[in-house]
Image: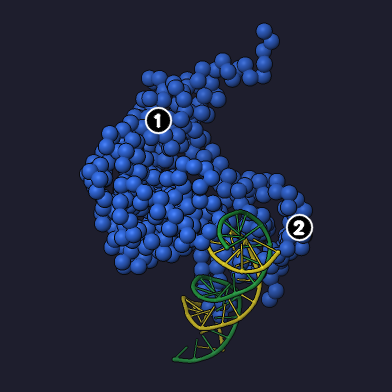
Chain colours: A blue, B green, C yellow
Amino acid sequence: MEESIFQPYLSAKSLFKIDREILRPAYIPERLPHREGYIDQLAQILATALRGERPSNILIFGKTGTGKTAVVKYIENEFRKADAARMVSYLYLNCEIVDTPYAVLQSIGNRFIENFHQRIPFTGLSTDRVYNLLREKLDEEKRVVIIVLDEIDKIISKNGDDLLYQLLKINDDLTKARVSLIGISNDLKFTEYLDPRVKSRLADEKVVFPPYNAEELFDILADRAHRAFDNGTSPDAVLHLIAALAAQEHGDARRALDLLRVSAELAERQGDDHLSDEHVQKAKSKIELDTVLEAVKSLPTQSKLILLCVLLNEEIGNTKLTTGEVYTTYRELCRKTGVSPLTQRRVTDLISELDMLGLVHARVKSFGRAGRTKEIQASVPVVDVKKVLEKDEVLAEARGYRLKVQTTLL
DNA sequence: TGTCCACTGGAAGGGAGGGCTT
DNA sequence: AAGCCCTCCCTTCCAGTGGACA
């Protein structure tokens, strides 16, 4: 048989025993090391639901990768297993994706509507109508509904706490069904922005997930590695290194698992039969760069343009910029590319967004008489990111464009 | 001590794009 | 078809401000 171009890669033995899904953060394993206590605690609170009563509302706090989502999904699986769970509906929503009051009510409602034609449309109705539809639907049966709102702070910061207020008081309007909420947030302070009534009702119970330390991360890695690889593929020393690296990043288990998976993929591609420190280091920089490039790629055109402005300035040695300078460059680039320019007010907002994405550093600084403005700096590798930016059709005209070096007027 | 710069960032609102209701 | 509603992206308007300088 003729050898195809894929042959060498197919015959290379896969390092992964079953499939690499086991190393994806979305995978929920049968046990979550160092979270057993929290699972117990939540089980105790939520067990009420199995008796047909409404459990307390719960707020869960913890930085990214501390297992909040994993625990909550784990509990979802446990509810599925429980016999008495037919009267319990457990639904998970991520408020970063479902991020408007309308959309939240709509997607909760649609979980209880099987008939496709009766489903609540994604737009067109008033929010009040959707709320009423939801309420009626819920109250058709005696049941306990547990709604998990992941990244709950996202919906508060965008829309205020009206939605939460509505969801918390829905029980007053229900006769058969009962609703309780589980909010998840990585911002400990977000409750400060809530109406006191909402705040006290929402946080009947509060749980804080601490970051994992290096040993705990090691246990998690070892647990998964054991299932993902054959013995000897991932030496303990390498796992310790990964654990240490992830511990530095505020104990992010997601990071740790990504590192392990990417390291293994790199090793596999190189035809090595076990992981080494070198793979880990390479994986680390690969992940970092990939994350940045992915973020840049998915930016809207205007934001890309603004980022490009910052990079072009960086290229000519202009590393610290003010909003005004960015805006001047921006106007210039708009002319060059035929993009219709936004106002400076809007551009400031987009700069702040870039800052939040970690693509630029922007902090407000006062220059005394010279005014008060943002000081903006790129925080991404210029060459790699420019390459990605220039792939955008709209920015094609700006390809290879250089700024003129400004001689400062005295 | 006060002035004054170059913005910052909140508020309000317009209008396009989605789609329901009557 | 006319009248609503919700969301997103923007614009307009503007009071507020940290700190170097006079």
Mark before the other along the chain sequence, 2 or 1:
1
Chain letter of mark 1 equals A
Q: CA distance from mark 2 to mark 1?
A: 49 Å
Considering depth in this image, is A102 or A398 the residue closer to the camera? A102
Q: Relative to A323, is A233 on the left or the right?
A: left
Q: Image quadrant for the C terminus of chain A? A: bottom right
The percent position of residue A222, horizontal first and vertical second, equals 35, 29
Amino acid type, residue under disc 2 in the picture:
Thr
Residue that appears at 41% across and 25% down:
A228
Residue that appears at 22% across and 43% down:
A51
Specify the quadrant of the image occupied by residue A217: top left
Residue that appears at 54% across and 62% down:
A352
Q: Relative to A132, is A174 on the left or the right?
A: left
Q: Secondary structure at mark 2?
A: helix
Tag 1 residue: A238
Q: Are marks 2 and 1 in one subunit?
A: yes
The percent position of residue A239, horizontal first and vertical second, equals 38, 31
Amino acid type, residue under disc 1 in the picture:
Val
Tag 2 residue: A337
Q: Secondary structure at mark 1?
A: helix
Q: Work out whether A408 lies above or below A10.
A: below
Considering depth in this image, is A269 or A81 the residue closer to the camera? A81
Specify the quadrant of the image occupied by residue A68: top left
- Mark 1 is surrounded, within 10 Å at the Cα level, by few (under 14), some (14 to 19) or many (20 or more) other residues, namely many
Chain letter of mark 2 equals A
Q: Is residue A358 something that shows in the picture?
A: no
The percent position of residue A171, horizontal first and vertical second, equals 31, 57
